[in-house]
Image: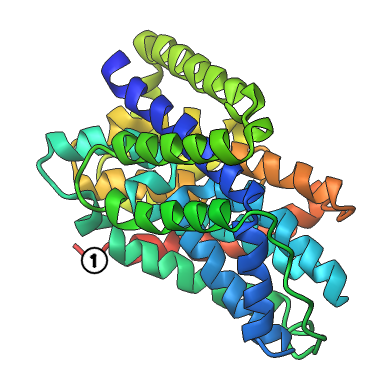
């Protein structure tokens, strides 16, 4: 168990430090402004660029980065441009979930799944790319349908955000860009993430030491992950696996995904994955069906994933009210479509 959890915790700490320091270096603010400039005053173009940015951030720097750091940027941008903010709020949180299938680094559940995939001698990406593309496309189509009245709007292009330290900005930008190929190179993802975090910490130590605080470290999140591992391990050793095997079945991937989605929405996606991994670990397709359920299917309740809870807090801080019912009824439209579509796209 320690061998599995240690690299995940190291990656989680490192990528959180990278994301926080990149945010302080104004990487995300500049990216959002450039998106507004490239869209040339049309909301539908701006939305498509935010879709691309949210998808890229989720894939390369994990769903937490997208949900936690991009959300306040796009909400602030929407407020400045006088655009209804819920279009961008739901774009970030939904794509944070549904775009997190592609790479192991995109979600903690995927990182945990790397071990079973290796034991099955199957490349993660060889199984994930079809359902990942399907889940992203379905999410974008549902967003366009639900918010179609906002897309024809126009806006005035804002000024470029001031960058106090261009060395920090370009250094952080380079680290974020280089992490992409590093994460898909086959190297244990904790290594490039740690190197990137150390490089940025070194730059900030020289240029802006005051930014290096202990609060950069996601202590509460790390403790939560350790507790979840412990609790699920205890329950699994006392009969939980047998119950889940009966509920999820042994043949239908859609049934497995649906069971995983229900568990994620009731108890959070990380413990749902940990509890159900033994039920799915005999097949790479069942493993991917499990990930579809916990990653894409957790978008019904505000506690379905830690990223969603953090996203809700950022929305509240920005003055954007998202009630549980507002989140639920939209999720009831997206979740069945994206889970079923991604499972069908597995295409054995």
Does 239 appear above or below 183?
above
Give the residue displayed 38% in from the left and 45% down from the top.
105
Which residue corresponds to mark 1? Answer: 347
Q: Quadrant of the C terminus?
A: bottom left
Front-most of 296 and 78? 78
- Residue 193 seen by the camera: yes
Q: In the shown orientation, is residue 323 left or right of residue 291? A: right
Q: Quadrant of the N terminus?
A: top left
Does 296 appear above or below 302?
below
- Residue 252 seen by the camera: no
Q: In the shown orientation, is residue 123 left or right of residue 338? A: left
Q: How many callouts does the rendering have?
A: 1
Q: Position of residue 271 (x, y in %)?
A: 49, 27
Q: Position of residue 117 (x, y in %)?
A: 20, 40
Residue 164 quadrant = bottom right
Q: In the structure shown, which secondary structural element does the residue marked by tag 1 occupy? A: loop
Q: In the shown orientation, is residue 37 left or right of residue 17? A: right
- What sort of colour scheme is used for the picture? rainbow
Give the residue displayed 80% in from the left and 89% down from the top.
154
Front-most of 204 and 38? 204
Q: Position of residue 269 (x, y in %)?
A: 52, 37
Does 128 appear above or below 187?
below
Front-most of 178 and 232? 178
């Amino acid at each position: 168990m320690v061998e599995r959890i240690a690299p995940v915790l190291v990656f989680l700490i490192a990528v959180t430090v990278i994301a926080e320091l990149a945010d302080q270096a104004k990487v995300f603010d500049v990216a959002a402004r450039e998106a507004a400039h490239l869209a040339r005053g049309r909301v539908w173009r701006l939305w498509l660029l935010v879709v691309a940015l949210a998808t890229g951030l989720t894939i390369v720097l994990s769903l937490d980065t997208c949900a936690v750091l991009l959300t306040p940027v796009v909400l602030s941008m929407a407020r400045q441009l006088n655009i209804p903010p819920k279009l961008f709020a739901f774009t970030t949180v939904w794509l944070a979930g549904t775009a997190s299938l592609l790479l192991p680094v995109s979600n903690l559940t995927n990182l945990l799944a790397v071990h079973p995939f290796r034991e099955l001698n199957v490349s993660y990406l060889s199984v994930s790319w079809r359902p990942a593309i399907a889940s992203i496309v379905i999410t974008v189509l549902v967003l366009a349908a639900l918010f179609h009245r906002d897309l024809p709007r126009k806006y005035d292009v804002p000024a470029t955000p001031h960058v106090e330290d261009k060395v920090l900005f370009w250094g952080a930008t380079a680290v974020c860009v280089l992490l992409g190929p590093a994460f898909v190179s086959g190297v244990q993802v904790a290594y490039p993430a740690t190197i990137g975090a150390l490089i940025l910490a070194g730059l900030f130590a020289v240029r802006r030491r005051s930014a290096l605080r202990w609060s950069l470290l996601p202590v509460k999140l790390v403790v939560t992950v350790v507790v979840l591992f412990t609790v699920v391990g205890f329950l699994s050793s006392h009969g939980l696996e047998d119950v889940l095997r009966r509920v999820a079945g042994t043949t239908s991937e859609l049934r497995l995904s649906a069971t995983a989605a229900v568990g994620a929405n009731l108890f959070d996606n990380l413990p749902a994955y940990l509890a159900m991994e033994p039920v799915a670990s005999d097949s790479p397709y069942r493993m991917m069906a499990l990930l579809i359920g916990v990653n894409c299917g957790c978008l019904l309740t505000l506690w379905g994933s830690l990223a969603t809870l953090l996203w809700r807090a950022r929305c509240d801080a920005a003055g954007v009210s998202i009630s549980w019912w507002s989140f639920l009824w939209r999720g009831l439209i997206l979740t069945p479509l994206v889970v079923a579509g991604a499972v069908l796209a597995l295409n054995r």
